[in-house]
Image (cartoon, rainbow, N blue to C red):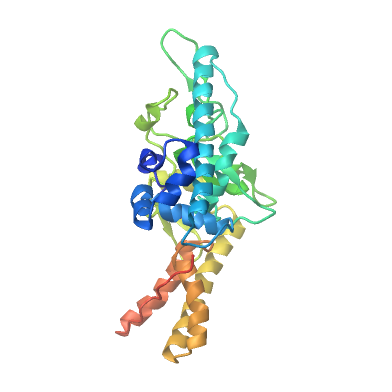
Amino acid sequence: MIRIIKPSVDAVAWNSIVTEDDDLAAGVSAWNEDGWATALGPWKPFFEAHAVRCEIATPPLAADVWCDLLSEWRGVLRSANEARVKLVESFKRTGDGKVDDNIYKKFMPFLLTLFNGKCAYCETLFSSNQPGDVEHFRPKGRVVDAAFRPILIEEPDSMPREHPGYYWLAYEWTNLFPACADCNRYRRHGKKAESGAGKADRFPVEGFRAHLEGDEGKEHALLIHPSDVEPSKHLVFEESGKVKATSNIGTETLAHLGLNKREFLVKERRRARVTAERFYESYLQAVITNNSSRIEQDRDRLNEMLAGREPYTVMQLMGIESVRGRLTAYGLSIPLPHGAAR
């Protein structure tokens, strides 16, 4: 599990680019590269990566490609914002409302780009037959405890009622993540498993729990937020592929996601470390023997590992660093390659 920071929607100077869709193409064409870099800020590499992932074009992107990308993104945001307003109004008026799954699922291509096609929690790579889910960090429709009993809201002068879920965050970019079925849905693992794993509608907090829009900032969540929280402060990955918790947040995260319970996941993490270690040793051998063709061939994949584009990045980096540590012990230093492929 690695932290991948999401660019904030507020970080984009939309008004500095264009205000109306009709002006979008003209606005894109008129700006030079420096202008786009300034206006888009952290979004520029995000959109470029999205274009490559969707096989639209290779950077630098032409004006018409920027136009298509921004139109697509703005359309998703507009639909999500309009749906959020309607949903919140429905709850205020009737105490109920229906979340439109089709709207928040439109974020999936952008989430896949940002998280390199991997589960935000366990780093398993998605495939055509395992495409992944759009996961809500704070559950959208209901909230249950560890035993799947409904969380109750108790207010003065009213009967306890079931928590309706964080419905106002159902379409919120910062609340959405790509997740594999094993992390997102509860299921049992192993033939004799007495308990299962998978987040589902569970969301543990310490103390105060929000049930009104805007109060979520007062909560102390006991799960690692893949963008806001640094996992290494709560989890330690071991060479065996197991993960050790170093805090209550880490303990709850391991328990809810089953990061140690899924035996195949532990084995794959261990294999990723060993593979990266051997691959880096092979790369070093090519460097020492000045095998230019092998260096060129291995460099691209090594850069993919270092950039977090392969599964189980934490374990891969552990394997690479173990080799570098041995080199350092002998007073040797071979720099890592540069020029990572996109």
User: In front here: 292 or 152?
Assistant: 292
Q: What count of labels does the image hold?
A: 0
Residue 334 position in % (x across, y down): 36, 81
Question: In the current view of this chain or complex, which residue is farthest to the bottom?
Answer: 289
User: In front here: 55 or 304?
Assistant: 55
Q: Is residue 53 above or below residue 105?
A: below
Instruction: For residue 198, say whether it is visible.
Output: no
Q: Is residue 142 above or below residue 130?
A: above
Seen at 50% across and 18% down, the residue is 89
Instruction: For residue 268, say whether it is visible.
Output: yes
Residue 63 position in % (x across, y down): 48, 53
Residue 74 position in % (x across, y down): 49, 39
User: In front here: 207 or 20?
Assistant: 20
Seen at 41% across and 44% down, the residue is 249
Which image quarter: residue 222?
top left
Classify residue 58 as left or right of residue 333.
right
Seen at 52% across and 85% down, the residue is 294
Question: In the current view of this chain or complex, which residue is farthest to the left?
Answer: 331
Residue 12 position in % (x across, y down): 38, 43
Q: Is residue 88 above or below residue 179?
A: above
User: In front here: 148 or 106?
Assistant: 106
